[in-house]
Amino acid sequence: MNCVVLGLGSNRSYNGMSPVELLQKAVTELKNIMDNTICSSVYRTKPMYVEDQEYFYNMVMLGSIHDDFDPQRLLQHIHKIEAVLGRNRSKEFRFGPRSIDIDIEFFGELEIHTRDLEIPHPRLHERAFVLQPLLEILPETADILKGEKLSKIQSDYSDLNSTDVELFMGRDDFLRQVEKEVHNGNTDTRSS
């Protein structure tokens, strides 16, 4: 089993679902391949890089993934979830609006630098919208990130102006909605 940290974000509705509902759908699907999941609260955040767009709703999800899921296979699975939830990479522009975005922030202790995948995420240190929810959930986990990584995350976060990141929905409320989604049987985002 490998520990995986994912960053999730949305700032555009899709198919009648709000950005928060899209996050809930993504979490529901990711729980099908991850064990021992922990989700952060949802934060409303000012867009970075391209500021002329709607605010984002961001969160972090942490969990264990089976050894048969290497980072590339996980990325392929993430791309399928994103596509079903309305993300069309061929029609979007870099850092622009999107129905759902799921980034692999960490995958165990691996470091990967390929054309289509970099782990740890190369812009993690400048993203309060990932660091704040990550710091929210890490105190509850045991040995998820080694001490030096956690210290670096805390240092990076303290160096940022995080006033553009505000709590939108507490974790318990968010997870109640996810459980309601599962209970109602709306857990499969794959195409029929």
Image (spheres, helix red, strand yellow):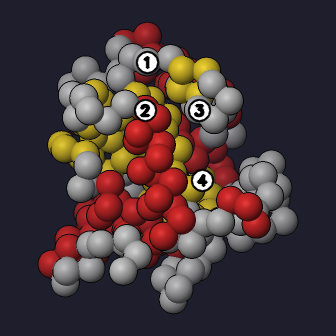
Q: Is residue 6 left or right of residue 127?
A: left
CA separation, marks 3 and 1?
Answer: 12 Å
Q: Helix, strand, or loop for circle 4? A: strand
Q: Are marks 2 and 3 in contact (CB under 8 Å)?
A: yes
Where residue 115 appears, as percent x and y from the top left, is: 68, 30
Mark sitting earlier along the chain (4/3): 3
- Position in image of residue 43 (x %, y %): 51, 58
What's the residue type where badge 3 is placed?
Answer: Leu
The amino acid beneath tag 2 is: Pro
User: Disc 1 marks which residue?
Assistant: 110
Disc 3: which residue: 117
Task: Identify the secondary structure beneath mark 1.
Answer: loop
Quarter holding the C terminus?
A: bottom left
| Mark earlier in primary sequence (3, 1) | 1
Query: Looking at the rendered structure, which numbered label has been put on residue 71?
Result: 2
Camera-nearest label, 2 or 4: 2
Q: CA distance from mark 4 to mark 3?
A: 26 Å
Q: Tell me the mark number nearer the camera, choosing from 1 and 2.
A: 2
**Image quarter in which the N terminus is found:** top left
Reading the image, the residue beneath label 4 is 165
Q: Are marks 3 and 1 in contact (CB under 8 Å)?
A: no
**Label 1: few (<14), some (14–19) or many (≥20) C-alpha neighbours in 10 Å:** few
> Which residue type carries mark 1?
Leu
Q: Are marks 1 and 2 in contact (CB under 8 Å)?
A: yes
